[in-house]
């Protein structure tokens, strides 16, 4: 059980870092659109590459944590949902870009950044809940 606690703790830590990087990415993207391009395209690509690396590490740690904590009935549910949401954080934006743009045009509010932040909060919150329940 100590290995499971270590892996869930590592996953919770990485998911919290991922949440912080998502907030940074959303803030930088809004700043670039709002204030003109003060950050060059190469810097923007480097930030996106780092975010993708943290996403891959988070998902890998999450899958290992699910495997290690599978015997714990109380931690298995939130941890599994958190990993599915973390995978959705990578796959979701490209798949949902069209419907989100239609909703944004209809409502007049930028839903993309709000959905990414809500999704990131859910991933991190469920990982921390699983850590508490183990």
Image (spheres, grey):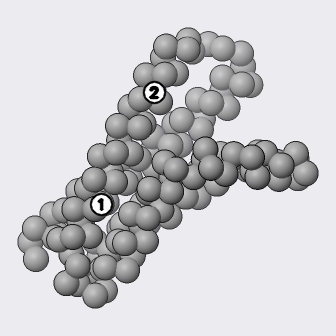
Q: Is residue 18 above or below residue 84?
A: above
Would you call the spot at circle 2 few (<14 residues within 10 Å), some (14-19), or many (20 or more)?
A: some
Rendered-image quadrant of the C terminus: bottom left
Rendered-image quadrant of the N terminus: bottom left
Would you call the spot at circle 1 few (<14 residues within 10 Å), some (14-19), or many (20 or more)?
A: many
The reply to whether residue 114 is visible in this rendering is: no
Foreground residue among 77 and 39: 77
Residue at image position (83%, 49%) is 102
Q: Is residue 131 left or right of residue 49?
A: left
Residue at image position (56%, 12%) is 40
Rounded to the nearest whole Å, what is the CA distance between mark 1 and mark 2?
Answer: 22 Å
Q: Residue furthest right?
A: 106
Residue annotated with mark 1: 62
Q: Is residue 25 left or right of residue 108?
A: left
Q: x and y percent of residue 109 in the render?
A: 82, 48
Q: x and y percent of residue 29 in the render?
A: 62, 30
Residue at image position (43%, 22%) is 46
Tell me the tag on residue 130.
none
Q: Is residue 12 above or below residue 95?
A: below
Residue annotated with mark 2: 47
Secondary structure at badge 1 equals helix
Res 67 → quadrant: bottom left
């Amino acid at each position: 059980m100590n290995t499971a606690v270590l892996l869930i703790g590592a996953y919770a830590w990485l998911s919290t870092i991922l949440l912080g990087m998502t907030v940074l990415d959303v803030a930088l993207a809004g700043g670039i659109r709002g204030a003109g391009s003060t950050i060059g395209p190469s810097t923007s690509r480097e930030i996106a590459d780092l975010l993708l690396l943290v996403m891959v590490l988070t998902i890998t740690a999450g899958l290992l944590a699910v495997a290690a904590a599978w015997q714990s009935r109380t931690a298995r549910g939130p941890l599994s949902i958190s990993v599915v949401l973390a995978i959705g954080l990578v796959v979701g934006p490209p798949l949902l870009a069209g419907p989100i743009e239609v909703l944004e045009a209809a409502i007049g509010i930028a839903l993309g950044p709000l959905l990414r932040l809500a999704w990131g909060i859910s991933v991190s919150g469920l990982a921390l809940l699983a850590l508490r329940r183990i």
